[in-house]
Amino acid sequence: MPTPTIAALASGFGWHVTDLLRAAELLGVRLEVAPFPEVSARVGGGPARVGAGKIDLTGLDGVLVRMMPPGTLEQVVFRMDALHRVAAAGVPVWNPPRAIEAAVDKYLTLATLDQHGIAVPATWVGQSAEDALRAFEELGGDVVIKPLFGSEGRGILRVSDREIAWRSVHALERLGAVLYLQRFVRHPGHDVRAFVLRGRVLAAMRRSATGGEWRTNVSLGGRAEPARLDRAADRLALAAAQAIGAEVAGVDLVEDLDRDELVVLEVNAVPGWKALSAVTKVDAAAAILEALRDQAR
């Protein structure tokens, strides 16, 4: 049987790419690292092709989107178009383009989850600073302002003062940013990241804020420890991943103490696993490549 070949679309050789290369050698999989900025396509005048450098993505056994680097609107749209074309050629793409599109946009993520009856925090999204200030009051005067795109807790601000809210939303309006305000969820000081792979929770970790920081992200100094999900949390994580169509996802769950319910904060369709593997001892890289290899067969 020929050695399966999978491409990891990335923007460099960081820790995750190195871990995937290790796992690929362990599994007997050939892993090609394909830089996202080198993605190109050809249509007409011969066979259609989507490639990255010298790698023909439409001729592989699978494509794993490891990182979606920043870019202009045109670049991002083209990259997604290219992924759609690779998937249409019959190559398994993880995550599927539709799932990445749904998860990269925080509003679309929450709207999709809400449409499927999944509990999410009260959130307002718009373009007017004056409308945002009214939403600030309606959301209880204690909100988290987030960028529409972004991850790892970067660029988010908790605001409970109206004057600071006024300055923040007007500054964002001047920048032409979409205004995203979410009611601050009073929680027990921790949340849970569930790592979902093909319809099961592969592993989970509890992330606790430290040093007076309200954000729990490990990248911002949060403390991580293994977590065992109860049946309700497990079902919620799986439902969230299924709602956006993700084969692999990082689902963030938090207990809303004011409403006495578990809610989904975000779904990451390009999730990292460095902290998760460290605390749970689960080889996430090997599990992902093995599952993708098996689907290709």
Image (tube, rainbow, N blue to C red):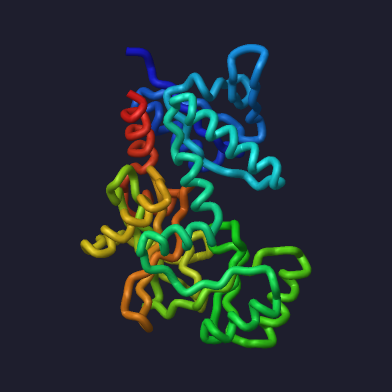
Whole-percent x and y of residue 85? Answer: 54, 30
- At a point 41% along the width and 46% down the height, the residue shown is 246
- At a point 65% along the width and 87% down the height, the residue shown is 162
Q: Quadrant of residue 159?
A: bottom right
Would residue 95 appear left or right of 262 to someone viewing this image? right
Q: How many numbered discs?
A: 0
Viewer-closest of 182 and 125: 125
Whole-percent x and y of residue 50? Answer: 59, 25
Residue 1 higher or lower than 196, as above or below: above
Q: Residue furthest right?
A: 174
- Quarter holding the N terminus? top left
Q: Quadrant of residue 78?
A: top right
Q: Residue furthest left?
A: 231
Residue 226 higher or lower than 130, as above or below: above
Viewer-closest of 106 and 21: 106
Would residue 180 appear left or right of 116 to someone viewing this image? right
- Quarter holding the C terminus? top left
Viewer-closest of 295 and 33: 295
Q: Quadrant of residue 261?
A: bottom left
Would residue 217 appear left or right of 233 to someone viewing this image? right
- At a point 50% along the width and 77% down the height, the residue shown is 183
Whole-percent x and y of residue 206? Answer: 35, 64
Would residue 175 appear left or right of 21 to someone viewing this image? right
Residue 209 higher or lower than 111, as above or below: below
- At a point 56% along the width and 37% down the height, the residue shown is 10
Whole-percent x and y of residue 132? Answer: 64, 77
